[in-house]
Image (tube, grey):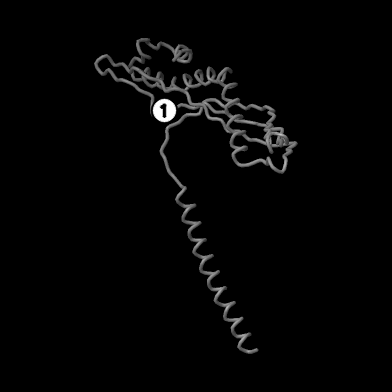
Amino acid sequence: MNRFIFGFIAALLVLGSIWYFVGKRENKDEIRANSAMIQIQNVGKLIVTEGYYSQVFTFKNSRNLFLDFFPSDKKALVVANAKATVEYDLRQLETRIDEENKTVVITKIPEPVINIYPEIEYYDVTQDYFNKFEAKDYNKIKSSVTAQFRKKIESSSLKDNAQERLMSELVNIYILTKSMGWTLKYNEVIIESPEQMKNLKR
């Protein structure tokens, strides 16, 4: 009897030691993996416009089982809110300096970049046992919602407003060159006033 109790206690100690060291090693691996996700990148981006959008979507998927005799459905009501930003990478702004004629020429203005940040909520979710929601369904819904928002933004005035805001920011270049007695040009157009700069088209 004593041997049995001693053996039982010894087995518990061995199992406990294995569990402790394995768990400790797994924790280390998890911390190391998380720290590897940190990245640092220098950027020169200017966010000039933000827009907010809301829309309701209906998602439905039907799967036929057993030689198409038994349909299995899943569906959900999707309420999506999104923030969209229009930004410019100022590192892509190209200029040329003509020292002889005291002229600064802006030769290229960067293209606008639209970023969409959707927040999705699911309501009235129904699913059958053989056709449940999976991770790929949620990813598909998010991609579809983002595409719908992007289409709506492209046809809106958000990009035009962003263009005007960018030109308003670039007025500072005009003010600087003017204060130094220099001339500012955008390609072949001489900029003679802040208002002209603001109304320029890319």
At mark 1, the secondary structure is helix
Q: Quadrant of residue 81?
A: top right
Give the residue at x 72% y 39%.
127
Question: Residue 95, position in %: x, y?
Answer: 34, 21
In the depicted structure, whether residue 39 falls above or below residue 1: above
**View extreme (front): residue:** 67
How crowded is the residue under tag 1: few (<14 C-alpha within 10 Å), some, or many (20+)?
some
In the depicted structure, whether residue 28 falls above or below residue 175: below
Give the residue at x 35% y 18%.
107
Image position of 190 (left or right of 11): left
Q: Amino acid at mark 1?
A: Leu
Check disc 1 and report the residue beneath it. Answer: 90
Image position of 54 (left or right of 26): right
Image position of 184 (left or right of 196): left
Give the residue at x 31% y 16%.
103
For the N terminus, the image quarter is bottom right
In the depicted structure, whether residue 115 falls above or below residue 41: above
In the depicted structure, whether residue 27 falls above or below residue 110: below
Please count the marks in the image.
1
